[in-house]
Image: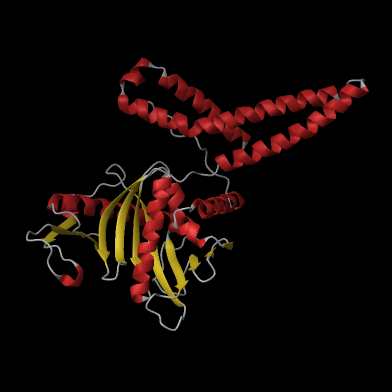
């Protein structure tokens, strides 16, 4: 681990030198690339330097134990105990920082919410989940833009796709992918029976054109008139757009905007995100058999989380977390769940970490 850290510090000094090079400063693209790299490895270097100072202080205190003065020895023993605790803390932090970073963590996300099993009640809960994520985005000062939505006649949602823009959005929302199960008494239930419904959520990192190139001849574009609830036409022009990615068969539709061009642009963003997600999943499946598909079929029996209204309970089944704060969570106070998930998966990554490749980026600075 320490050889790797020495290498990262060497690279950090190289990058600092590049950033002060007038040729690099004049090359905007190169300068931004080195700035990102500097920020990426800067925290590791800061903590590593803190670790080295602590080790130096510890060695100094160990030297004092050789002193003949009993008072100095006693002070040194106390100092050694504190420094050993600090050393262990910093070592643990360094191990976390050296976990291979998900390159998508800083990306915006496209979130897709769909009603599964449960009829109208599933649609109502899909709307509840969208409100929860919208409020969470507001709390974190992220922006949210609806890409496509299909409402039910009773105030629910058959499906909604939205773009959430903000620093670290994917790093915090990626654990929301899966089937969410709700247990509650519907307003239409006259005998007070609890119904179980399911909603699927998929969280995809937004794909930029630099991440994924889609050739024009790979996409079939169909246009048609937008329709509202019940199938009635809500537009007199062919503004709705359907994109079909011919190599994979993926289909994306968008009809929320009155402009055909805007609908096409939104649909292309969703298509690019789905293709990037598919590519990432294929890469992960090659590396690990533990990778599971993001979402199930929407069946009640498949779930990552259960929201039990009668008990005001939220249970995340992946980590065995149960909180009796359902209302707070649905109001967007999602960090109490997200933080536990991040901690769990970081610990899992540390436990199963293989001897990883050197974290240093390629040293091409042409």
Q: Does residue 339 lie above or below 15 as drawn?
A: below
Judge whether residue 151 can be spotted in this image: yes
- For the N terminus, the quadrant is top right
- Coloration of the structure image: secondary structure
Q: Does residue 11 lie above or below 173 as drawn?
A: above
Residue 2 locus on image (x, y percent):
62, 34
Residue 355 locus on image (x, y percent):
58, 45
Towards the viewer: 230 or 9: 230
- For the C terminus, the quadrant is top left
Residue ID at (26%, 50%) = 269
Residue ID at (48%, 57%) = 329
Residue 204 locus on image (x, y percent):
36, 54
Q: Is residue 95 left or right of residue 143?
A: right
Residue 111 picture quarter: bottom left
Residue ID at (54%, 64%) = 315
Q: Is residue 310 left or right of residue 69?
A: left
Q: Does residue 15 lie above or below 121 as drawn?
A: above
Residue 363 locus on image (x, y percent):
43, 29
Towards the viewer: 43 or 148: 148
């Amino acid at each position: 681990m320490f050889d790797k850290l020495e290498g990262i510090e060497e690279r950090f000094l190289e990058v600092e030198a590049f950033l002060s090079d007038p040729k690099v400063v004049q090359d905007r693209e190169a300068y931004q690339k080195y700035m990102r790299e500097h920020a990426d490895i800067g925290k590791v270097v800061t903590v590593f330097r803190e670790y080295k100072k602590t080790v130096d202080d510890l060695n100094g205190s160990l030297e004092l134990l050789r002193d003949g003065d009993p008072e100095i020895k006693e002070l040194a023993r106390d100092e050694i105990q504190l420094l050993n605790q600090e050393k262990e803390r910093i070592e643990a932090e360094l191990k976390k920082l050296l976990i291979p970073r998900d390159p998508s963590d800083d990306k915006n996300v496209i979130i897709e919410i769909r009603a599964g099993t449960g009829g109208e009640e599933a649609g109502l809960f899909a709307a509840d989940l969208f409100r929860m994520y919208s409020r969470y985005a507001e709390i974190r000062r992220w922006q949210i833009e609806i890409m496509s939505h299909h409402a039910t006649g009773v105030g629910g949602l058959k499906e909604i796709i939205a773009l959430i823009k903000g620093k670290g959005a994917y790093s915090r929302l990626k654990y929301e992918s899966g089937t969410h199960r709700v247990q509650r008494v519907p307003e239409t239930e006259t005998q007070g029976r609890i119904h179980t419904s399911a909603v699927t959520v998929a969280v995809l990192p937004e794909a930029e054109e630099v991440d994924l190139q889609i050739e024009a001849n790979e996409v079939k574009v169909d246009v048609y008139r937008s329709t509202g609830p019940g199938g009635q036409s809500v537009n007199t022009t062919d503004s709705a757009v359907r994109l079909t990615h011919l190599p994979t068969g993926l289909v994306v539709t968008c009809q929320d905007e009155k402009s055909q061009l805007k609908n096409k642009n939104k649909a292309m963003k969703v298509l690019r995100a789905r293709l990037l997600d598919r590519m990432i999943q294929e890469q992960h499946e090659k590396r690990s058999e533990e990778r599971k598909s993001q979402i199930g079929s929407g069946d009640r029996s498949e779930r990552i989380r259960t929201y039990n209204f009668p008990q005001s309970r939220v249970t995340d089944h992946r980590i065995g977390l149960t909180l009796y704060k359902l209302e707070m969570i649905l109001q967007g106070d999602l960090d109490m769940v997200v933080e536990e998930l991040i901690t769990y998966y970081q610990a899992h990554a540390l436990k199963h970490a293989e001897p990883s490749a050197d974290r240093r980026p390629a040293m091409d600075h042409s």
